[in-house]
Image (cartoon, helix red, strand yellow):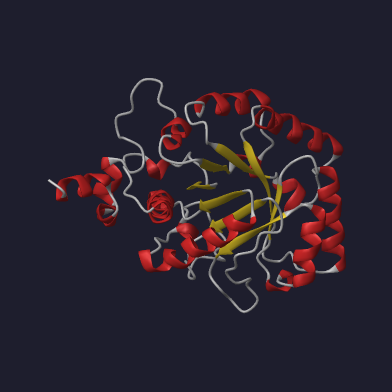
Amino acid sequence: MIRIGPAGWSYKDWEGIVYPALKPTGFHEATYLAQHFDTIEINSTFYRPPEPGIAKNWVRKVSANSRFRFTAKLWRGFTHERNATADDERQFKGGIDPLVEAGRLGALLLQFPWLYRNDLENRAYLFDLQRRFRDYPLVLEVRHASWNQEAIFDMLAELGIGLCNIDQPLFAKSIKPSAHAASAVGYMRLHGRNYTNWFAQNEQTGDRYNYLYSLDELEPWVERARIVSKRARDTYVVTNNHFLGKAVVNAFELVSFLSERPVQAPDQLVQHYPVLKQISAQKTAHETR
């Protein structure tokens, strides 16, 4: 099973592009996306531990798609700030457990920053995180090339932690694209290739993720997804280049490539990104008449 979808769903700049300008009564973004995709990566859990009631509501919103699984980022207090307490741990687990109980959590992403390098201290910290969250399907995202070692892949396999294969701007010590599967969960994240704004201090505008992959750039990731899926039970391909809905555009293209069939993208998205006409079901139907 390869599940494809965007990272997050609550972006103001998606209004009228990804989502219709005039929303029907009861509209919810996750429900809308779950009509087209089989996963969404939850971003909000990185910024604050979720509330159990909110997680239960997320489950209800995607109930129509039996294949759908969320993935979620671990709170940054564990990964970036490293100041999370035992109370924080209980709160985070309590907030995420409704997804687990409903069978809707595909992976918990341990996302570390570029400065998190492969050394004794950081490996020890990873061992501790695995101990604390071993009851969840864990995936590690690291961005520094020092982690690209067979010994690390073996270590992750022993710990039962999947490895996130990423696409990112490549600087001197950036980890390069790969197709590794260290556990039963395969994972890929496409961040875009915006070299100019990758290390910009102000990320509020989303400029860091302002990048639309071309079809040629996506093609190698289609092959990597197929390779990973042969080694993992479940594979997740997440597009994180969310600026102005570009993640959704590329997610539709990946779905079309991997399924080898046209997709039914929303009209307003096709109008904003005419490149989708190449893979749209609407175009195919028109051409066959």
Q: Which of the pair 177/229 is nearer the observer?
A: 229
Q: Residue at x 53, y 70 (%)?
A: 169
Give x and y (percent) for residue 198. 53, 65
Asked if 27 appears above or below 276 in the picture, the reply is: above
Asked if 281 appears above or below 49 in the picture, the reply is: below
- Which residue is situated farthest in the bottom direction here? 172
Asked if 214 appears above or below 128 in the picture, the reply is: below
Q: Using residue 219 as the reference point, say whether residue 77 is left or right of it.
A: right
Give x and y (percent) for residue 274. 25, 54
Q: Residue at x 86, y 38 (%)?
A: 86
Q: Residue at x 21, y 49 (%)?
A: 283
Give x and y (percent) for residue 189. 56, 56
Asked if 226 appears above or below 132 in the picture, the reply is: below
- Number of numbered markers: 0
Quarter the C terminus occupies: top left
- Which residue is situated farthest in the top direction here? 25
Q: Using residue 47 as the reference point, say whether residue 245 is left or right of it.
A: left
Q: Using residue 198 as the reference point, say whether residue 261 is left or right of it.
A: left
* Corner quadrant of residue 147: bottom right
Give x and y (percent) for residue 143. 65, 65
Q: Which of the pair 200/267 is nearer the observer?
A: 267
- Which residue is situated farthest in the left direction here? 289
